[in-house]
Structures are given as structure tokens and as C-alpha cells.
Image: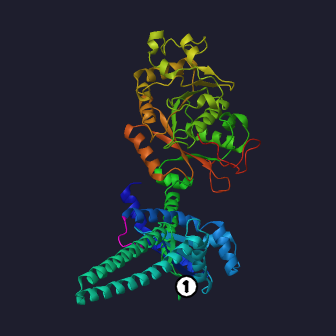
Amino acid sequence: MELNQYIRLFRQWAWLIVIAALVGGGIAFYARRSQAENYKASTSILIGSYLQASNPESPDISIGADLAKTYAEIVMTRPIMQSTIDELELDTNVHNLKQAVETEILEDTSILVISVTYGDQEAVAEIANELAHQLTLQSPTNLTEEQEQQISDARDEISQLNAEIERVNQRQNAIFGLIETETDPTQVDLLEAQSNVFALQSAQLRDTRADLQVLIATIQNRTNTLDIIEEAERPEWAEQKGVIQTAILGAVIGVILAAGLVLFINYQESTIKSPEQANKTLGLPVLGTIMRFGKSRDSYSQRLIAHQAPTSPIAETYHAVQTNMLLSANGRATRQGIYVVTSPSPGEGKSITAANLAVSMAQSGLRTLLIDADLRQPKVHEILEIDNKGHLSKLLTTPPSHYDLSVENADPNAELPPILQEHVQESTIANLMIITSGELPEIPAEVLHSEELSEWIKVLRAFLDLDVILFDTPPSLVVADSAILAANVHAQVVMVVEVGQTQRDNARKAKDMFVHTGSPITGVVLNKAKPREQSFVYGYGYQSSTRAAPSNTSSSSSNNR
């Protein structure tokens, strides 16, 4: 189908697609809303204390952001989870709690957000906060108690130093006042000496205070310290995340399923499913309907049912088909037929059909020649279990006159000329002869279009005393070989279509191809029909039981070549 055909098809079934979208979306929405309510709470942790620095440096921020990724993994470990469960006495296990926890690192920061989705509205915030608390407690790189004590002691010393510096400054200021009022030079020198002592003491105290401040900053400014900057709070509303997305997904799935159903219905409606439909579609007689038989693992030779089980209903059907093929327009049988057996597409069973028809004709006493003209994927030698030693393309490279062969000097009772002995194989079935494909030519169409082919057909008919010649050819819509061959040898065409699989458009295209080349179409063979379909009729007036063929036959599809 072309794009515009698909567009028309989906427009025709738009109502079904819309209903499927609404139903799918509605079911998904209801199913999501019907699930138990969950609540979500989050707590935030700052990795590093660079914000306390007067001039935070970029490396500290970058390291903090990198460390946040590690802490996001640590919070999901079993010790953190189990400690949280134990502390809050939760009725859950580590696996289930992990499923409820998500971590996120805010972009371009070292802030780690721990989120918990839980069914208990009261407990969800407690769980988030306890996870953060356990992370700070169990983090191997957080401040130790000794470091915390060092900071506390240093701050106490700084407080004492500040008081001492204040006292020294006050005493120094008092001396400055005395110097301004003193007139005795000796006393002034003494006061200035005391002032210098106080100035030195003040400087020493300030240096000591600065050292302690550096110590505190060194401990506090570690990049992997953890600070809980925002605790989780009890959520007011249940989490509704994903309801709309789920509904949309359900609608999309509904549309996909509806589209698939539309394509399936269209495919089924556009295939040939009965003799009446084949006749109406193609305007051609239905030569017969072959039921499915054999097993999928059967070899090609096991599918030669006309030989393996000649009295079976399937074999009787092939006999009915070959009888209808040979009937002329006035109802009299013709014994000089040349037939091209083909199908529109691969896998519809034309090779198995051709071989079984050849066997059936031979069993009816007709001297039959089966030629494998499928010079792309030949199968006749496999079906009949013979060597592929014949070489059709080699035979056609030289005209019969090269071997001094002509219709006039043909003697069916004499020994076959060597060239014919080389390429024509006798089978174990009386009256059946075969020419296999042999080595495949580079351009099969040229071989089948050669003038030598029609000359060889006349010679073969005369020397072999043939009644019927059957050609197995490639699918007609894949390559033009069958149309070229039919026109070249003035053959009648037998088209094999698979019930429920062959598209009506493809069958029409195949028919038109032969009509365009002027090749008459004898009729259609419906292949691989289901045995339970009681309405199938085999040929004109021939009916056969729908029971399975004995022994090696079943309702599985194996007549598919």
C-alpha cells in the first residue's frame, strides 16, 4: 500500500482509533487513581561549608558538588536504611524503603535533596529527616567530636582574649590621658614607656586571637562537611504525579492497538479467501482448492503428496486440478499443453503445486516434462529428490540444429540423443521426466527470453513424445521471468494464490502482467486453505472430503514453496 492509501484507511477507521484512545486513556487514568495514595516529603543537605567563608572559591564549590554524588549513593546503602528503620521502628524492610527513596543533586550546587514517597502521611517526613540525620552521623568524613571540642575551646579562648585586649586598651588610653597633662619630662618618658608595653601586649593578644580564628576556619572550611539546611515537613496532599502521563500513555497504547487492528482487518479484507472471491476478483476460473497439508518440518519430498499418498483427498484434489487444466473451452481435453506455474509472491506454494500436478498428470498416463525454470531459487530437484545435474541454461545456449536435432528427424522409439540424455532425467514415477535448473545463470531473464528455448520445446516434445510440459517459474511480481517465459513459448499460465494471504491487488497485478504480454491464463489454484472451511469446492464439479490426508498430512502449513 502507498502512503495515501494508508491515510485513507485510517481516516475511514478514525472513529475506532478515537474510541480506543479514549478507552485506553480512561482505563489508565482510573487504574492510576485507584492505586493507594502516597505522600512525598524532602529534606535538603549542603555538602561543604564554603558558604561560611567570606570569599568562597570555585574549587571548593566544585569539590562539594562532586562529593554530593558520593553522598547520594551512601544514603541508599543498607546501614543508613537499616538505622532509619530501627530508629523509627518502621514496619518495612531495606529493599522496600530503597524503592521509596529518591536522591537529587540540585544543578550547579552541592545541595543533596533526599525525597521519600510513602503511604503514611505522618511518617513520610520523619523518614526523610531521619535518613538525613543518619547520613550525617554515619558519614566517615564529617567532623569528629574531638574537632567539635577544638572549635569550642578555641572560641572560649577567643572570648577571653577579647576581654584581655579590651582591658589592655583601656589602660593604654588612661596613660595617654596622663601624658597630655604631665609637665615633668622625666615622668612623661616613664609614661610613654608604659604605653609602649601595653601596645606590645595588645599586639601579642591580637596575634594569638588571629591564630585561633585560623584554626577554627581550617576545621570548619572542610569541603565535605554535611549541614541539614532544610528539614522535611508533613505533606498536606497526596502525591498525584504521573496520573496525566499514565493516561496519555494509555491513550497512545490504545491508538497503537487500534491501528494494528485496522491494518489486520484491512489485510484480511484485502486477501483472497474463497473460490467465489477469486473468481470475482480476477474473472478467472478456479481450477481447484488445495487444503493445507503436511507439517512445517516436513522435507520437500514429503510434500509431494500426489506420490507419497496417491489415494489421499489432497492427491485427488491435484488430480481434479490437472483435469480442469487440460479441459479445453469446448469441454474436450487437450494433450498438447504447455503451462507456466507461478504465483504473485514468494511462499504461496507454486513449486509444490507444480511438482504435484506433474506427478498427477504422469499418473494419469500423460507423458509429462517438468522443467525447473526458477533460475533464482530452484526447488524441483529437492522436491523430487534427484540430482541437480541438468543444466537448463546450458542447454539453451546452443540451438537444436547444432546437434542435428529437429522435429522432422525425431523418433520417440529410438534411443535419446546424447544431449537429451545429459539434460533430461527420468524419474522413478512412470511418464514423468525432469529438467532441473543446474547452474544458475547471471541473467535468468535473458536465458528464458532466448529463441533457442521455443525451438528446444518443439524438439523435446517430438523426441520425448510429450503430452504436457510444466514450467516452475519465479513469483511473477518479484521478477518478470514467468511473463517472459510464457510469452516466449506461448504457454498457458496457472496462477497459484494462498488463501487468506495473497492480496487481491497483487493477484490482479499478476494477472494484468500476463494479459499485457498476451499469455492466456488457464485459471487459479487456491492453495493452503483451512480444512474446516466446508465451502471450498475443488474444480468444476469435483469435490473432496475435508478430512486430513493419512500418515504424513496434518492441518499445518507445509505446502508453502
| 1 and 413: which is toward the camera | 1
Residue 209 image point, x, y percent? 42, 75
Q: How is the image coloured?
A: rainbow
Q: Say if residue 135 shows up in the picture.
A: no
Q: In this view, does 520 lie above or below 488?
A: below
Q: Residue 283: where, in percent of width, then height?
A: 47, 50
On screen, residue 488 above or below 420: below
At 27% from the left and 79% from the top, the residue drawn is 189
Q: In which quarter of the image is the C terminus?
A: top right
Q: Residue at x 73, y 42 (%)?
A: 312
Name the one closer to the observer, 491 or 88. 88
- Say which of 221 and 433 sits in front: 221
Q: In which quarter of the image is residue 127?
A: bottom right
- Quadrant including the N terminus: bottom left
Q: Which amino acid does label 1 sit on?
A: Ala
Give the percent coordinates (x, y) of residue 387.
62, 22
Height in image: 109 above or below 299?
A: below
Quarter of the figure with residue 390: top right
Give yes or no for residue 128 being in the magenta stretch: no
Which stretch appears magenta?
Answer: 51-57
Q: Name the residue under label 1.
A: 238
Magenta span: predominant SS is: loop
Is the residue 247 above or below the residue 376 in the image? below
Residue 289: image x %, image y %?
Answer: 61, 47
Q: Is mark 1 on a helix, strand or loop?
A: loop
